[in-house]
Amino acid sequence: MIARFVARRAAALAVTLLVASVAVYGALFLSPGDPATLLVGGGKEPSPGLLKEIHRQYHLDDPFLESYWRWLSGIVRGDAGESLSYQDSVTHLLADRAGNTLFLIGYAALLIVVLGVTAGTVAALRGRLADTTVTVVATTLMAVPVFVMATLLIWLFAVRLAWLPAYGSGSGFTGRLEHLTLPAVALAASWLAYVAQVTRSAVRAELVSEHVQTARSRGIGERLVIRKHILRNASAPIASVAGVAVAGLIAGSAIVEQAFGLNGVGALLVQSAAQQDLAVVQAVALLTVVAFAVINTVVDVVTAALDHRVPWGGGR
C-alpha cells in the first residue's frame, strides 16, 4: 500500500515538473526585449548584421518547441546553456554559488524547526503567560516583511552593537556561521513564527483529545503522555507546515542574499533578471520549482507515515 502511495506521488511530481518546465520556459520565451543586445553593450545602436549573428549563434530565433526541447534535454544532461551577461556556462555559475545558498537555507530551516516547534510546544504546555508571550512575538514576526527584518537586524546587530557582520558569506564553517547568522534569522523569522503557531494549535488540540484523557485516567505519567500521545500525534501537521516553510525559504533567499550582499543563487537570479539573461533565469526558476515540488512530495509521504488516520489509498 505504501509503495503504491509513493508511486502515485512520484508520478504526480513528474507531471508537475513537466508542466512547470513548459511554463517557466514559455513565460521567458515570450517576454519582451532582445537578449542579444546584452552582448553588444555600450550606448550605440547595434548593427542588424551583428544582432542576426548573435541570434543565430544562441538559437534565439528557433521555434518554441525546438528551443524548448534543446533546453530541457540539455538540463537533463546537466547543461543549462550559456549565460549571455557572464559569458560562462549556467551550470558553472550555479555550482559556484550553490554552497552559500544551501548553507543559508539549511541554517534557516534548522532555526525554524528547532525554535518554532519548541516555542509552540512551550506555549501550549506552560500556561497563559508563555502562551501569550509566544503568541504576541509570533504575530509580530509574521507581520514583518523579510526585507524589513533584514534592515532591522543589520541596524541593530551589525551597526549599533557590532556583534555580527552584515556583508559577505565568510569562509570555512565558522566564518559562514558568523556571516550567515543574520541572513538566516531574517529569512526564518516569519516562517518560524508560523510553525510555532501551528505547533501550539496542534498540541493544544491533542491535550483535550479523548485518547489523552483516557491515558491520564489510566494513571500514565504526564511526561509519557506528552511524549507518546500528544507530541507524536501532533507531529503530522507540524511536519507538513515545517516542510512547506523550508520550501518557501528557497524563494525568500533571493531577497535576503541581495540585502546582505551574499554571493548565492538567489542574488544571481535577481541580477540576471535585471540583465535579461534568460538562460540563467530559466535555470534558476526551474531549479526553484523542482526543489519546492520535491520537498512538498517528501512532506506528503512523511505526513502520511506519521498520521495513521490518513488512508494510504486515497484522499490526499
Image: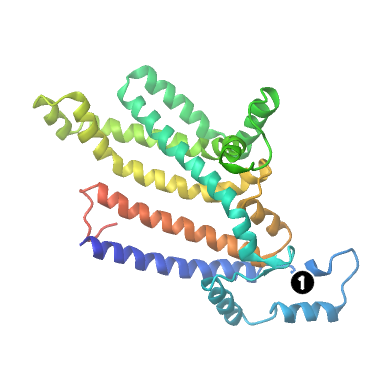
- Foreground of the two, 208 or 106: 106
If the image is split into quadrants, where does the N terminus sit? bottom left
What count of labels does the image hold? Answer: 1
Q: Residues within 10 Å of mark 1 (few under 14, many from 20)?
A: many
Q: Give the residue at the far left of this rendering.
A: 218
Q: Give the residue at the far front of this rendering.
A: 172
Q: Give the residue at the far right of this rendering.
A: 44
Q: How is the image coloured?
A: rainbow
Q: What element carries label 1?
A: loop
Type of the residue with mark 1: Ala
Whether residue 294 sits left or right of residue 221 in the image: it is right
Q: Where is residue 156 in the image (x, y as percent from the top left)?
A: 65, 26
Whether residue 311 sits left or right of residue 121 in the image: it is left
Q: Position of residue 313 (x, y in %)?
A: 22, 61
- Depicted 60 relative to depicted 244: above or below: below
**Residue at image x 35%, y 68%?**
11
Give the quadrant of residue 151.
top right
The residue that disc 1 covers is: 36
Q: Position of residue 113 (x, y in %)?
A: 41, 38
Q: Position of residue 190 (x, y in %)?
A: 51, 37
Whether residue 216 sits left or right of residue 232 in the image: it is left
**Residue at image x 19%, y 24%?**
222
- Depicted 270 relative to depicted 235: above or below: below
**Residue at image x 88%, y 64%?**
42
Give the quadrant of residue 25.
bottom right
**Residue at image x 61%, y 49%?**
254
If the image is split into quadrants, where does the C terminus sit? bottom left
- Foreground of the two, 277 or 131: 277
